[in-house]
C-alpha cells in the first residue's frame, strides 16, 4: 500500500506567495513542496556563500498528512522589500530569520501573535520606526537580534518580562531611549550585546548566567560594579568606548576576552590575577599607571623592547596594510610601502618593526571560522593608481592602531588611502571596485539611488560627524568632508574616512587658527579667509554634501549652462532666490526669509532634486534635506546648527530654523581670489577647481 507524502497546507502555500512578493523576491518556485525540500526556492541561481532559504515544517497534523511551517529563514539575499505582515498567516512559526537583507519599513505588530516563537532575527536590515510593544507578548522567545537597523524609541518595558530570553543583541539599532532595567535582571539571559546608544549609569545586573556581555559606546559613566568581576561564567566583557571611571580591584580576574579601551579608568595595574587570567585584554586609552612587569603585556601600548634607542631617524613612512612590500615609482621618486602581512592572530595582538608597529583587538564573535583571519585579499580589478596597494587589507573587529617611532622632530602630513575591496555579487553592487559615495551620487555608472537610500546616507554622515564633534572622548574636526571621503558598505551605511587633515579640538578653546587645507568648494568661508577653524567648518561641508545627495550633482564639477553660478551651491541658491544676479556680479543683495520664500514659490525645491528620482520621493523629507543643507552652509558659522541638531532636523524630531541670511554670499574676497591667494600651497594639486572666466568681475 502506497501512502501519500504529507504536504504543506494550501493556505500556507498561498501565504508564501504573498510573503515572497512583499519581501521583493523576483523568482519564487513552488513547483516542489518546500516542506519536502526544506528549501524555499527564491532565486534561479545556485546559492552563494552565506545565503540561506530554509523552510522547516511540522507534518504531524491531520494524521500526518498536513504540514505547517515552523522555521522561516531568508538570509543574505539583499531583498529590497518589507517585512511581510503576511507572516502572521503562518500560525505555527517558531523561528523567523530575515537577517542580512535590505528590508525596510516598520516591524509589523502582528509578530506579537506568534506565541510559539522562540527566535526572532531581524539584524542587518534597514528597518525603521519603533519596536512594537506587542513583541512583549512573545512569552516563549529565547533569542532576539535587532542589530544594525534604523530604529528609534526604546525597547518596550514588557520585553523585560520575557523570562525565557537567553540572547539579546542590539548593536547599532538606532534606539535612542535607555534600556529598561528589567532587561538586565532576566535570569536566563546569558548573551547580552548592546552598542551605540545612551545608557548613562552602569546598569544593575543581577543575572548570574552571563557568558557574553557587550555594552560598547553607550556613554556609560561611573565605576564598573565589582559584581561584574564575580560573574562565574563570563567569557567576554566589552565595555570599550564609554566614560567609565574608578579603579579595577586588585583581586579582580579578567574574563578570557576583556576590552576596556577608551574609558577614563585609573589606578595602578599590577601583575596579578587580572592580567594572568587573560591573554586577550585591551586596556588602552585610559588613565592607568603601570608597573614595569605588566606593561609588556598591555595591548595597544607597544612592548617596551620595541622602542629601544633609535640608530637613525626618518622623515617618512609608507605601509601596505595587510599586504607584502610594494615599491611605487612616480615623478617624486621611488617609495617602498613596507609590508604588513604579519601572520599574527588572536583577539589581542601587537606587532613592531624598526620604525612602526600596530595593535589589533577584538573577537569575531559568532563567525563560523574556527581560526580567525585578520588580513584579506581581493582579486577585484581596482581602477586606481597603484592598484596593488588596494588588493589587501587588515581586518579588525574592534580597534586597530598603527604607531610610528624613530622620526625626526617636526610636523608631518598623514595620508590614508581608502578603498572598499570586497563586494556583494547582488545588484546594485556588482564589482564596483572603488565603491565610493560619488559613484552612486555623482558618477556615471547608471545606478539609481532611491530616495530612502539618499536619506539614509545623509543621516548616516550627520550621525558620524555628531559623534566626532560631541560624543567622542577626543573631539575631532575632520576638515575635509566631501563625497569621496564617505565610504558606503554593502548595506549603503555611511562611513566617514580619510582623517589625514583632521585636527583635535580642545574644549577650552573657542576655535583653532591653522593653515588652510582641504578641498575647494567644501571649505567654510571663515576658514578659507582667516584660517578660523571650528566644528562649524565640518557643518558647512556637510551642507554642501547634503546638497550633492539631494541633487545628484557634484559641487566641484557642476557648472550650469549660463556659467554664472560657479558651483552647485550657487545653482541651488538661484532656484530659491531667482531675482538675485550672479553672485560674481554682486556685493550685496536682498536677503529672503527662507520659509516665507518657499510658501511664495510652491514646489520650487523640486527643481533642485535629482531627475533620476523620477518624482519618487518623500516630499517632506526632500524639502527638509534642502532646508538643512542651506542652513548648514550659512555664511555665518554661529547660525549653523550643531551636527546633533542636524540629525534631529533630518529625522523630523525638531523644527528647522528659519534661514535668516543667504548662505551663499561669501564676499568677493573669498569667491574670486586666485587659488594662490587662499592657501592652496597647502593643498594637493588634485584638490584645485578652476573657476569659469566668464564669472570674473
Image (spheres, helix red, strand yellow):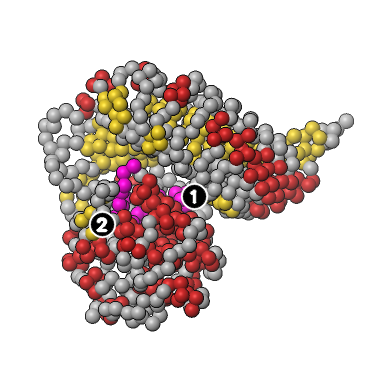
Q: Nearer the viewer, residue 697 or 512?
A: 512
Dominant secondary-structure state across the stretch colored magenta: loop
- Left or right? Give the position of 459 relative to 100: left
Q: Is residue 525 magenta?
A: no
- Structural distance between the alpha carbons of marks 1 and 2: 33 Å
The answer to whether the residues at label 1 and label 2 have Cβ atoms under 8 Å apart is: no
Q: Which residue is painted at 45% across and 34% down in the image?
A: 202
Q: Position of residue 435 (x, y in %)?
A: 41, 53
Mark 1 Cα shell of 10 Å, populated few (<14), some (14-19), many (≥20): some
Would you place residue 669 above or below residue 687 in this image? below
Dot 1 lies on which element?
loop
Q: Position of residue 614 (x, y in %)?
A: 53, 69
Q: Nearer the viewer, residue 530 or 3?
A: 530
In this rendering, does residue 13 appear at all? yes
Q: Report the quarter where the N terminus lies.
A: top right
| Residue denoted by label 1 | 491
Q: Earlier in the sequence, mark 1 or mark 2?
A: 1
Q: Nearer the viewer, residue 160 or 370?
A: 160
Displayed quadrant of residue 12: top right
Would you place residue 543 above or below residue 409 in this image? below
- The part of the chain drawn in magenta is 473-500
Q: Which residue is painted at 17% across and 60% down in the image?
A: 681
In this rendering, does residue 359 appear at all? no
Residue lying farthest left?
Answer: 312
Dot 2 lies on which element?
strand
- Left or right? Give the position of 292 relative to 546: left
| Residue denoted by label 2 | 533
Amino acid at each position: 500500500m502506497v501512502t501519500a507524502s504529507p504536504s504543506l497546507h494550501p493556505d500556507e502555500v498561498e501565504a508564501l506567495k504573498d510573503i515572497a512578493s512583499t519581501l521583493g523576491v523576483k523568482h519564487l518556485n513552488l513547483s516542489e513542496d518546500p516542506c519536502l525540500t526544506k528549501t524555499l526556492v527564491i532565486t534561479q541561481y545556485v546559492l552563494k556563500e552565506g545565503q540561506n532559504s530554509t523552510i522547516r515544517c511540522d507534518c504531524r497534523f491531520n494524521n500526518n498528512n498536513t504540514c505547517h511551517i515552523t522555521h522561516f529563514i531568508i538570509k543574505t539575499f539583499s531583498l529590497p522589500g518589507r517585512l511581510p505582515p503576511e507572516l502572521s498567516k503562518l500560525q505555527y512559526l517558531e523561528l523567523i530569520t530575515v537577517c542580512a537583507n535590505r528590508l525596510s519599513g516598520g516591524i509589523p505588530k502582528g509578530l506579537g501573535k506568534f506565541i510559539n516563537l522562540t527566535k526572532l532575527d531581524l539584524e542587518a536590515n534597514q528597518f525603521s520606526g519603533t519596536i512594537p510593544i506587542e513583541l512583549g507578548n512573545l512569552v516563549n522567545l529565547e533569542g532576539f537580534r535587532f542589530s544594525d537597523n534604523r530604529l528609534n524609541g526604546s525597547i518596550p518595558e514588557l520585553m523585560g518580562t520575557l523570562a525565557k530570553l537567553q540572547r539579546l543583541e542590539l548593536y547599532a539599532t538606532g534606539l535612542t531611549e535607555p534600556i529598561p532595567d528589567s532587561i538586565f535582571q532576566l535570569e536566563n539571559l546569558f548573551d547580552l550585546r548592546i552598542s551605540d546608544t545612551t545608557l548613562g549609569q552602569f546598569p544593575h545586573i543581577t543575572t548570574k548566567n552571563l557568558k557574553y556581555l557587550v555594552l560598547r559606546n553607550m556613554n556609560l559613566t561611573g565605576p564598573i560594579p565589582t559584581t561584574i568581576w564575580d560573574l562565574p561564567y563570563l567569557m567576554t566583557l566589552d565595555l570599550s568606548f564609554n566614560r567609565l571611571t574608578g579603579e579595577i580591584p586588585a583581586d579582580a580576574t579578567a574574563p578570557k576576552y576583556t576590552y576596556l579601551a577608551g574609558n577614563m579608568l585609573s589606578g595602578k595595574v599590577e601583575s596579578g590575577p587580572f592580567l594572568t587570567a587573560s591573554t586577550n585584554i585591551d586596556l588602552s586609552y585610559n588613565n592607568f599607571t603601570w608597573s614595569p612587569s605588566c606593561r609588556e603585556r598591555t595591548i595597544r601600548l607597544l612592548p617596551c623592547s620595541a622602542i629601544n634607542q633609535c640608530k637613525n631617524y626618518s622623515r617618512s613612512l609608507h605601509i601596505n596594510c595587510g599586504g607584502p612590500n610594494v615599491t611605487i615609482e612616480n615623478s617624486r621618486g621611488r617609495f617602498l610601502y613596507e609590508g604588513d602581512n604579519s601572520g599574527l592572530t588572536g583577539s589581542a595582538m601587537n606587532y613592531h618593526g624598526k620604525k612602526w608597529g600596530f595593535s589589533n583587538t577584538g573577537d569575531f564573535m559568532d563567525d563560523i571560522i574556527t581560526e580567525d583571519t585578520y588580513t584579506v585579499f581581493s582579486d577585484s580589478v581596482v581602477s586606481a593608481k597603484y592598484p596593488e596597494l588596494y588588493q589587501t587589507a587588515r581586518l579588525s573587529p574592534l580597534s586597530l592602531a598603527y604607531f610610528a617611532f624613530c622620526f625626526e622632530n617636526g610636523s608631518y602630513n598623514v595620508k590614508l588611502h581608502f578603498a572598499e575591496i570586497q563586494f556583494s555579487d547582488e545588484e546594485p553592487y556588482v564589482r564596483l571596485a572603488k565603491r565610493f559615495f560619488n559613484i552612486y551620487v555623482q558618477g556615471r555608472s547608471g545606478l539609481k539611488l532611491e530616495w530612502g537610500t539618499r536619506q539614509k546616507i545623509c543621516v548616516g554622515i550627520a550621525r558620524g560627524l555628531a559623534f566626532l564633534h560631541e560624543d567622542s572622548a577626543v573631539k575631532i574636526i575632520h576638515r575635509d568632508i566631501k563625497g569621496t571621503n564617505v565610504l558606503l558598505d554593502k548595506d549603503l551605511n555611511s562611513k566617514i574616512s580619510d582623517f589625514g587633515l583632521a585636527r583635535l579640538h580642545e574644549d577650552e578653546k573657542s576655535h583653532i587658527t591653522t593653515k588652510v587645507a582641504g578641498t575647494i568648494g567644501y571649505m567654510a568661508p571663515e576658514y578659507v579667509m582667516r584660517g578660523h577653524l571650528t566644528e562649524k567648518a565640518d557643518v558647512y561641508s556637510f551642507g554642501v554634501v547634503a546638497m550633492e545627495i539631494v541633487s545628484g550633482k557634484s559641487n566641484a564639477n557642476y557648472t550650469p549652462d549660463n556659467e554664472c553660478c560657479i558651483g552647485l551651491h550657487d545653482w541651488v541658491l538661484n532656484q530659491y532666490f531667482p531675482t538675485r544676479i550672479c553672485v560674481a556680479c554682486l556685493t550685496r543683495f536682498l536677503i529672503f526669509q527662507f520659509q516665507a520664500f518657499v510658501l511664495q514659490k510652491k514646489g520650487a525645491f523640486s527643481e533642485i532634486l535629482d531627475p533620476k528620482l523620477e518624482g519618487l520621493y518623500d516630499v517632506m523629507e526632500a524639502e527638509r534635506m534642502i532646508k538643512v543643507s542651506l542652513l548648514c552652509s550659512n555664511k555665518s558659522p554661529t547660525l549653523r546648527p550643531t551636527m546633533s541638531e542636524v540629525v534631529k532636523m533630518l529625522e523630523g524630531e525638531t523644527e528647522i530654523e528659519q534661514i535668516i541670511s543667504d548662505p551663499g554670499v561669501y564676499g568677493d574676497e573669498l569667491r574670486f581670489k586666485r587659488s594662490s591667494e587662499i592657501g592652496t600651497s597647502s593643498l594637493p594639486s588634485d584638490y584645485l577647481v578652476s573657476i569659469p572666466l566668464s564669472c570674473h568681475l
